[in-house]
Image: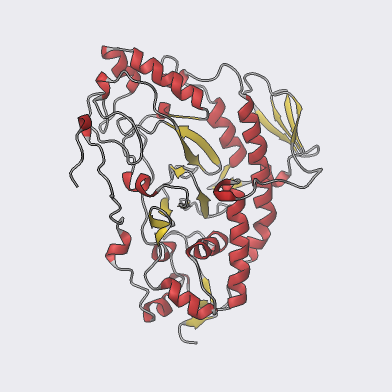
Amino acid sequence: MRGVTEDVPLDDVPLLDELMPWSVAPLRLGRSWIVAPDVRTLRARWDRLVRAEGTEREELFRPSRARTPSSSVAALPGQRTGTVRFVRESGPCPEPVRLAHGPFDEQWLLPDHRLIDTARPELWRVADERQLFAVEQGYVPGAAGPALLVTAALPAGRSPAGRPGRIRPLFRRPGGEEPNLAPGLLPLLSERYGRPVAPESVLAWAVAAARPSAAGCRVPLPADPDLWVAGVELGRRLTDIQLRGSRGGERPRLPGGRRPYVRAPIPARPTVLAYEPEEETLTLDDGRISPVPAEAWEFHVGGVRMLEQWFAHRTAPAEPGGLEAIGPAAWPQEWTSELLELITVLALLAQREPEREALTPGATLTRAALREAGVLPVPDAARRPASVLDHQEEGPEGQFALL
């Protein structure tokens, strides 16, 4: 079979950038107070800000080069937020939306374009109940963990170590229309594997098979149809775990007897997170959760331990006087539920990690084979967002945008 070889140089393994060519850079929020782990905190911060006037409002706002209270900004696609200059804003808090603030850390965001330095409106236009976002993790040499994650929430796209990755929507249009795949890829794979290949299958294979490199995620495509089926099935399981029941799936659960429970109440303001491997216990000061598999505690992405990062995002001290200092008076019950679910997610993914590491494609379809089939090079139009505007979007000061 032409273009298929057992020993493939790294440079001839397709890049995810070639298979899913439209990508978007991470969001640049500009101010940390517009994100919080709970909705009540965001509403309290908004109320505090709109009560302030003059220089106090400007100081609380935290102006940047991209946004000040006097910036003239259009509304975010799909969001009902004001477009008057924020210096005159006095209305109620907009409804917060879910944000994948980092790997395995869903928080809440104020979806107001006047507050976000670079919101990537093209992502908001295609975010709906059918969309999935593949988030490529920044390359960290020698770091363990998956190179590609999937979320149904709008992703911020930042990697744990601070290195930028890329956000790749599965579909270029709302409603699951026009897959974000290289033109001709689906027909080619369907022919090679002797079965119809759906866009979701390509994403599932990438989740299972993607490997990090300095040039970006490499995604070897197997020549063996049976290996493709096995890899897609593994990728679907990994994706379902990461989606945590969204998109109609089941919420992740560990087998009976291995499910984590709170054994001692978590204090109002825990400051230290630690792990006792002998007892499989996670401690938050005097609070205790067990059983917590060691694999969940050791789960890293980009060289960062996920449980420690999640905890730090909720307990790190904030600078007094700013809006970041407004938060819960005590540890909310929903954070405990989210922590138990996070432990479950990491444990289940860790159980599958040996399968993911062992997924070696053997003979693969090389970049040369994709060029021969006309799939590569990807046309420039496939790398640009599709024109999806089917209604007018409100511009600054209530004017409709002219596009």
Residue 282 image position (x, y, % from top left): 71, 34
Q: Nearer the viewer, residue 4 or 151?
A: 151
Residue 99 image position (x, y, % from top left): 47, 38
Residue at the image point whose x is 57% and y is 35% from the top: 310
**In the figure, is residue 387 to the left or right of 321?**
left
Residue 272, by quadrant, is top right
Q: Nearer the viewer, residue 395 or 228?
A: 395
**In the figure, is residue 55 to the left or right of 286?**
left
Whether residue 143 is visible, yes or no, is yes
Residue 331, by quadrant, is top right
Whether residue 7 is visible, yes or no, is no
Q: Nearer the viewer, residue 34 or 283?
A: 34
Residue 132 image position (x, y, % from top left): 47, 52
Residue lying furthest bottom: 1
Vertical arrangement, residue 17 with respect to residue 26, above or below: below
Residue at the image point whose x is 52% and y is 76% from the top: 364
Vertical arrangement, residue 130 with respect to residue 221, above or below: above
**In the figure, is residue 182 to the left or right of 296?**
left
Residue 74, by quadrant, is top left
Residue 239 image position (x, y, % from top left): 58, 54
Residue lying furthest front: 391
**In the figure, is residue 68 to the left or right of 268?**
left
Residue at the image point whose x is 45% and y is 82% from the top: 3
Number of marks in picture: 0
